[in-house]
Amino acid sequence: MNTDSSAPAVAIQGLTKVYARQGRGSSKHALDNVSLTIRRGEIFGLLGPNGAGKSTLINILAGLVNKTAGTVAIWGLDIDREPRASRGAIGVVPQELNIDPFFTPRELLEVQAGLYGVPEAERRTAEILEAVGLADKATSYARTLSGGMRRRLLVAKAMVHRPPVLVLDEPTAGVDVELRQGLWDYVRRLNAAGTTILLTTHYLPEAEQLCDRIAIINHGRLIACDTTKALTSRLDRKEMRLILDGDLAALPPSLSRYDVVQKGPREIAFRYRPSQVRAGTLLDAARDAGLGILDISTEESDLEDIFIELTRAPAATA
Ligand code: ADP
Ligand code: MG
């Protein structure tokens, strides 16, 4: 592998992909000047709504889609100058569960190892199947495997050549909750053993739990890239709901200097920035306005809020 250990796991500069449109209509910018760096050893999440360009980005890394412009280096290896070596540094679990139905898991891994030139003596088919919980299915036809098992088989397939970077495109699609947990446990173990992970997911709470850093793309553009913690605090927004002890005909004028709305006859909600306004100040204001407070609840913004907020901006000329 590359000896330059200062090179990032993945370095993407000005990555652009334009798919030629069939028939009438303009061409499609699936990726528009995306730059980002994935560090060695991290779990990096790529988030974005359907059609954002996540799979396009991943397929370019995998050498399955040709980029229109920009540069990509995997483990310090430029994908144009060293296509073979760079492909050897990455294992990709595709979004689609395409597996030849008449192969067994053992055969599939052996074939894959052969494709990557892994010598017989260095193959570890049994060990990998064990790790993804498919040891007892080693000789069953793939067509008899459930969706969750197929997904795990594809993870196993991506790991046969021991790549330092593992990429998972929407790995939880079609995987039930229990198996999803098992899959994430395995991904965490791989990461703890030194594998850098890049994943895309729609499960934002999971991204929040799993990822060290997160990039958000929308309409092919990078709209945020930060630590999970910084992204969540970036919004700096909370909501405080007050349940009142009597009906309220209208909001007291003295509260008009706050961002407050009436939610029901006996419920109002303040929206505020915790960095600037203390909850106690809002409570005092409500009491000073003569409101009797029966109950209070507050809500933090989570990644879902940030995601919605950041992706709400309409696309410029897409
Ligand atoms: P995501 O994985 O985030 O859902 P994709 O990368 O699959 O997004 O797609 C990004 C955009 O590129 C979408 O508008 C999609 O329709 C378009 N696209 C993807 N693949 C092709 C293709 N082979 N030919 C033309 N357009 C494509
Ligand atoms: Mg996709």
Image: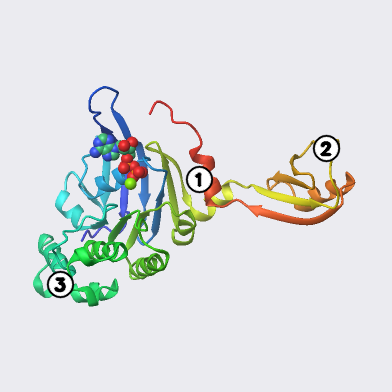
Q: 217 or 252: nearer the eye?
A: 252
Please name the amino acid that badge 2 sits on: Ala
Question: Residue 17, percent across and down?
Answer: 28, 36
Secondary element at tag 2: loop
The picture places residue 257, in percent across and down from the top left corner, at 79, 36
Amino acid type at image mark 1? Phe
Q: Which quarter of the picture shows residue 137?
A: bottom left
* Quarter holding residue 108: bottom left
Badge 2 crowding class, 10 Å Cα cut-off, few under 14, some 14 to 19, many 20 or more, is few
Choose mark 1 or mark 2, whichever is in front. Answer: 2
Q: Is residue 69 visible?
A: no
At horizontal 44% and vertical 61% (from top left) the residue drawn is 210
Label ID, residue 250: 2
Pick whichever of labels 1 and 3 is earlier in the sequence: 3
The residue lying at 20 percent from left, 76 percent from top is 126
Per the image, the residue denoted by label 1 is: 307
Please give the residue where the numbered disc 3 appears in the rendered image: 123
Residue situated furthest top in the rendering: 24
Q: Tell me the SS state at disc 3.
A: loop
Q: CA distance from mark 2 to mark 3?
A: 73 Å
Which amino acid does the dot numbered 3 rest on?
Answer: Arg
Q: CA distance from mark 1 to mark 2?
A: 33 Å
